[in-house]
Amino acid sequence: MVGEAIVITSGKGGVGKTTTSANIGTALALQGQKVCLIDTDIGLRNLDVVMGLENRIIYDLVDAAEGRCKVQQALIRDKRFDCLHLLPAAQTKDKSAVNPEQMQEIVETLRPEYDFILIDCPAGIEQGFKNAVSGADKAIVVTTPDTAAVRDADRIIGLLENEDIEPPKLVVNRVRSDLSREGNVLDVEDVVATLAVDLLGMIVDEEHVLKAAHKGEPIAMDPNSRASLGYRNIARRLLGESVPLMAVEEKKSFFSKVKSLFGIKS
Amino acid sequence: MTNNNGNYVTIKGTKEGLTIVLNDQCSFHELLEELKKKIEREQRLFENGPQVEVRVDAGNRYLSKSHEEEITEVLNKTGSVRVHEVHSNVMTKDEAQEVIEKATVTSVTQIVRSGQVLRKTGDILIIGDVNPGGVVEATGNIYVIGALKGIARAGTEGADHAVVCASVMIPKQISISDTYFYAPEKHEKQEQKPAIEGPGYAYVTGEEYKAIAFEETKMLGHYLRSVSYT
């Protein structure tokens, strides 16, 4: 088994890298894949919190990089899935505590044991980004449909083009059909046209996502949420299935609008 | 040594003005000495006459910048002579390389993304977009087959007649030589409108107050011909 190492990055902070990492990881695990999540946001770790695994951390990425423990010892098994593991970041150090060579070594150690290694990248384009990217063979760029996030995603894609890595795929997070319809934010087509990369999926903006992250339980577990469906579709696409893009607008509400037009109560 | 005194420098009158032909076989020192003498001798001639345009022809002699300046200085001392051009048939390899670079079109197939700077001597042809935050700089013209949404700087070494041409013209900023165009401030979160609908080019217009104007691409040939005559 030779796993794929995928870095999840965005440039800008707060667009949902960590949430996306946690949920794609969970969705892949749901499909029965062996997944390892690596949090490279040293000093500002979050992935463990989003996954609800904070209190189980003993060793971290820096310990593993510096040889204070074996890589396998630092891994934490997920509460819900046996096949989902997390390598947490250190909270007390900073990005310079690890270098790209150490990162590559860790990824190579893990590669034979997993189907997917998802690397959660910190915001920015400095050392942390270089570390995260060095071990990866693919990249997923996360952006939200606003100008600033798209600008930074564009910058990141430019930087990824210089790396020895496959052309990145795009995830558009927090899609709001009501706002883009009124022309208040960019719509997904605009984002894809500007960035000129393949769209891997889009996640509609939902309260459920925030609530789930608050509880330390990834939204991908929720069978009824549309955001969850978005993540699960991404996982299926990563496994090579071709899944059509979900309509941003809810069909039900559309029909109810038509019905209300004719005075039929829905 | 002074045998052929008087043969190194020849002054000819032509339709455009005076041409001073310099012998290219003697030493530069000798040449300069004789030029000085000749000018002194003819001082009367220059003194009261109207301003004369002079072209200096150095033949097959290589003239460095400082040599050129020395010659110009000697001639300018007379007061009524203006050196229009110092011509030599010879240039260094570096200079020749520069001339070639300035005349070449570099074609680049990529998207110039935010934070990337593409800088070239001569013209640039970009097959792809220039995204917001991306910068393209050329000493000559810039052609974009795609959308120009970032910054384009043409004629960066002072070529006022350079143009920026794009299939879709939504630039944040364009500069040609030292004339600038800024995209109008957009209000609310509305998309920026194109500077011109459809394929277009930007050029410098106006004499005293220069500004950048936009025109449809089909007029570009006309514009380029008009600037090549001036």
Image (cartoon, coloured by chain):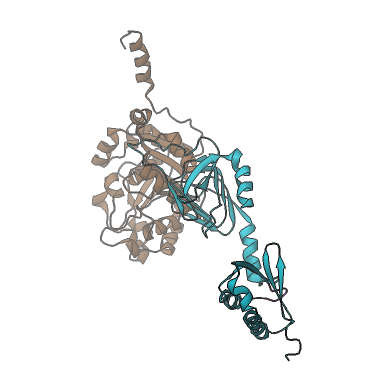
Residue farthest bottom in this picture: B1
- From the viewer's perspective, tell me whether residue A250 is left or right of residue B62: left
Residue B124 spot, x, y in % from top left: 58, 53
Asked where in the image residue B30 lies, by quadrant, the reply is bottom right
The answer to whether residue A238 of the structure is visible from this angle is no
Span of residues in magenta: B57-63
The residue lying toward the viewer, choosing from A147 and A203, is: A147
Depicted B142 relative to depicted A131: above or below: above
Q: What's the magenta bit mostly, secondary-structure-wise?
A: loop
Residue A226 spot, x, y in % from top left: 35, 30
Q: Residue at x 37, y 58 (%)?
A: A128
The residue lying toward the viewer, choosing from A184 and A34, is: A184
Depicted B199 relative to depicted B68: above or below: above
Depicted A27 relative to depicted B104: above or below: above
Residue A168 spot, x, y in % from top left: 48, 47
Chain coloured brown = A
